[in-house]
């Protein structure tokens, strides 16, 4: 990546995230690496799944057209610093992750990442700039493309509000209840 390109992307991430955190900065080499491996551009029709709610989703939003609301960005919070990226209608994907084995040469990133001590971002950021892709690994994955299904709207019998019926939902429910009301009735037991 060219220096100007990196600077431009840093600015975008900083603006979108509110400040430049270590996790948000790491999103830049991660998503660029994944796109290079897939042979696509950041602006392309790609789908990204992020495995943490921390910082990383904001970097993806800042650099791509993936958003929660357009369903191109999925957060599957398993607390891992990893992303999976695929092109639209393509079952081949790439999962890029911080490889803890590769952090040996980057002790500050290691201490921050493993939360060994409270490391201020200003201390981590230069080392991330130095490491860039050197601390990442990837593997190829297969994406399941879900069939497009008709959206079903039901009206909740308790609160009277319409809600989108989830596929797994409801099949065995005696009453037609939204998730909120279902929670409320089951917590009363
Ligand atoms: Zn309800």
Image (tube, rainbow, N blue to C red):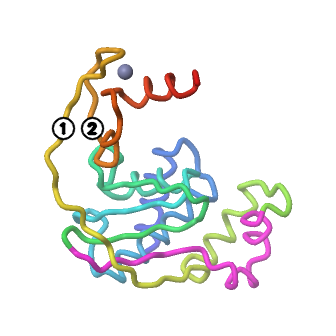
Q: SS for tag 2?
A: loop
Q: What is the quadrant of residue 108 in the picture?
A: bottom right
Image coordinates of residue 24 in percent, x first then y, are 55, 56
What residue would you read off at disc 2?
165
Residue at the extreme left: 150
* Numbered badge on residue 186: none
Q: From the viewer's side, name the closer residue of 45 and 21.
A: 45
Residue at image x 49%, y 23%?
185
Magenta residues? 90-114
Residue at image x 29%, y 51%?
71
Rate crowding at label 1 as few (under 14), some (14 to 19) or many (20 or more) other CA atoms within 10 Å: few
The reply to whether the C-beta atoms of the residues labelled 1 and 2 are less than 8 Å apart is: yes
Rate crowding at label 2 as few (under 14), some (14 to 19) or many (20 or more) other CA atoms within 10 Å: some
Q: In which quarter of the image is the N terminus?
A: bottom left
What residue would you read off at disc 1?
152
Image coordinates of residue 171 in percent, x first then y, are 30, 43
Nearest to N terminus: mark 1 or mark 2: 1
- CB of residue at label 2: within 8 Å of ligand 1? no
- CB of residue at label 1: within 8 Å of ligand 1? no
Q: From the viewer's side, name the closer residue of 178 and 137.
A: 178
């Amino acid at each position: 990546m060219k220096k100007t390109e990196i600077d431009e992307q840093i600015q975008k991430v900083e603006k979108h995230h509110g400040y430049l955190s270590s996790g948000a900065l790491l999103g830049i080499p991660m998503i660029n690496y994944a796109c290079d491996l897939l042979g696509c551009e950041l602006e392309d029709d790609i789908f990204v799944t992020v495995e943490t709610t921390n910082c990383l989703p904001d970097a993806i939003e800042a650099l791509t057209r993936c958003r929660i609301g357009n369903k191109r960005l999925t957060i599957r919070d398993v607390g891992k610093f990893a992303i999976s990226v695929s092109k639209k209608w393509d079952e081949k994907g790439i999962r890029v992750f911080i490889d803890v084995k590769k952090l040996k040469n980057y002790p500050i990133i290691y201490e921050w990442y493993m939360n060994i001590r409270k490391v201020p971002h200003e201390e981590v950021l230069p080392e991330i700039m130095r490491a860039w892709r050197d601390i990442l690994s990837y593997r190829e994955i297969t994406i399941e493309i879900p069939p497009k299904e008709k959206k079903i709207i039901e009206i909740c019998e308790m609160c009277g509000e319409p809600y989108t019926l989830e596929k797994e939902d409801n099949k065995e429910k005696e009453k037609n209840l939204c998730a909120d009301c279902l929670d409320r009735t089951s917590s009363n037991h």
